[in-house]
Image (cartoon, rainbow, N blue to C red):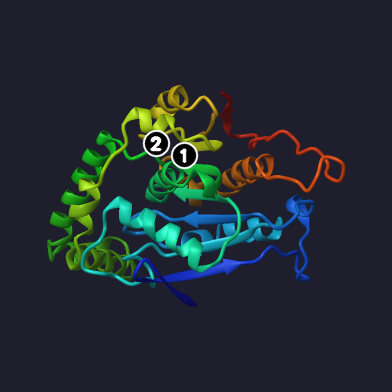
């Protein structure tokens, strides 16, 4: 486990170098000048980098991508400061982390849920550092997003304060589930995350339109975010969307292979090759057969 101080916070970082089992680069990205870098950002409160460690990260590294994962501030093994949980703080963490890791060139950002909101905000602030953006069941930080965060985090704090909740969870599910939920309660009651995230600065439509990097948005067909597909494409003509049937919000774990195929193809199609004479043309992105993909 590596701890890196970025933006004044000790961040837990894990890296999976591009590999093929022998230490050399092969696979999908073997023809690039250097292994492209992909940064994976996880979701809020109940999530950590471990959700990528056993899903997308191994396949990405095996295909020839340098993979960076990290626990967001307050999550996993990263430091949990008592305050400093505005969306802007998470954006600044990412910028500082790339500096500390001395990552050269634009990176491909993949964000699940809240991680995608952070990634989108970062792409708006630092377009020079972002090669492509993949949003997995995520959305830009709009006023509607902030209100939703206020409702969900506020109700969560109230429910988690109910002491009878934990024996109920242990009886209905398991002691492991009860302990995990208790750890969430400790997070929400030990810092200002639940107050600060809904109070974060949001983006107006004009600012959302300013994001120029290639954007892929992947949804579960049964998710409450799926209806925003048309709205996002109307703001970002260069955005591509894909919907995975019979899935709700947790498509990262519920449809890992389909998400991996879609994101890998997106990154491949937006990765520079050494020269026109030495590289084969990148094939057109092909989504998983069970996913419905929409092009701009």
Q: Position of residue 176 (x, y in %)?
A: 34, 70
Q: Earlier in the sequence, mark 2 or mark 1?
A: 2
Using the image, determine if residue 128 lies above or below residue 219.
below
Indicate left or right for 32 with 233 as reference. Answer: right
- When asked about the image quadrant of residue 164, the answer is bottom left
Indicate the secondary structure of the residue bearing disc 1. Answer: loop
Frontmost residue, 81 versus 179: 81
Indicate left or right for 66 with 116 as reference. Answer: right
Q: Which residue is mark 1?
A: 247
Residue 223 is labelled as 2
Indicate left or right for 268 with 234 as reference. Answer: right
Determine contact: label 2, label 1, CB under 8 Å: yes
Name which residue lies at 21% across and 64% down. 83
Badge 2: residue crowd in 10 Å (few <14, some 14–19, many ≥20):
some
Name which residue lies at 21% across and 53% down. 196
Kindly tell me whether residue 131 is visible in this rendering.
yes
């Amino acid at each position: 486990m590596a701890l890196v101080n970025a933006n004044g916070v000790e961040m837990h970082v894990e890296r999976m170098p591009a590999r093929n089992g022998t230490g050399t680069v092969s696979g999908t990205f073997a023809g690039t000048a250097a292994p492209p870098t992909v940064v994976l950002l996880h979701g809020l409160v109940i999530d950590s980098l471990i959700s990528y460690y056993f899903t997308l990260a191994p396949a990405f590294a095996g295909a020839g991508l340098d993979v960076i994962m990290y626990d967001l501030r307050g999550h996993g093994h990263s430091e949990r400061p008592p305050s400093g949980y505005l969306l802007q703080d998470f954006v600044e963490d990412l910028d500082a982390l790339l500096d500390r890791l001395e990552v050269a060139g634009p990176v491909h950002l993949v964000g699940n849920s809240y991680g995608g909101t952070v990634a989108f905000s970062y792409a708006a602030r630092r377009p020079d550092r972002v090669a492509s953006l993949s949003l997995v069941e995520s959305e830009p930080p709009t006023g509607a997003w902030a209100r939703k965060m206020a409702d969900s985090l506020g109700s969560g704090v109230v429910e988690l304060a109910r002491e009878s909740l934990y024996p109920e969870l242990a009886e209905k599910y398991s002691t492991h589930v009860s302990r995990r939920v208790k750890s969430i309660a400790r997070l929400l009651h030990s810092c200002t995350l639940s107050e600060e995230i809904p109070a974060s600065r949001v983006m107006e439509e004009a600012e959302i339109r300013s994001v120029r990097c290639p954007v892929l948005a992947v949804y579960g067909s049964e998710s409450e975010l799926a209806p925003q597909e048309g709205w996002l494409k109307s703001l970002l003509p260069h955005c591509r969307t894909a919907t995975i049937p019979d899935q709700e919000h947790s498509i990262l774990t519920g449809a890992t292979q389909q998400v991996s195929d879609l994101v890998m193809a997106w990154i491949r199609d937006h990765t520079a090759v050494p020269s026109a004479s030495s590289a084969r043309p990148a094939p057109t992105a092909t989504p998983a057969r069970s996913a419905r993909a929409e092009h701009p």
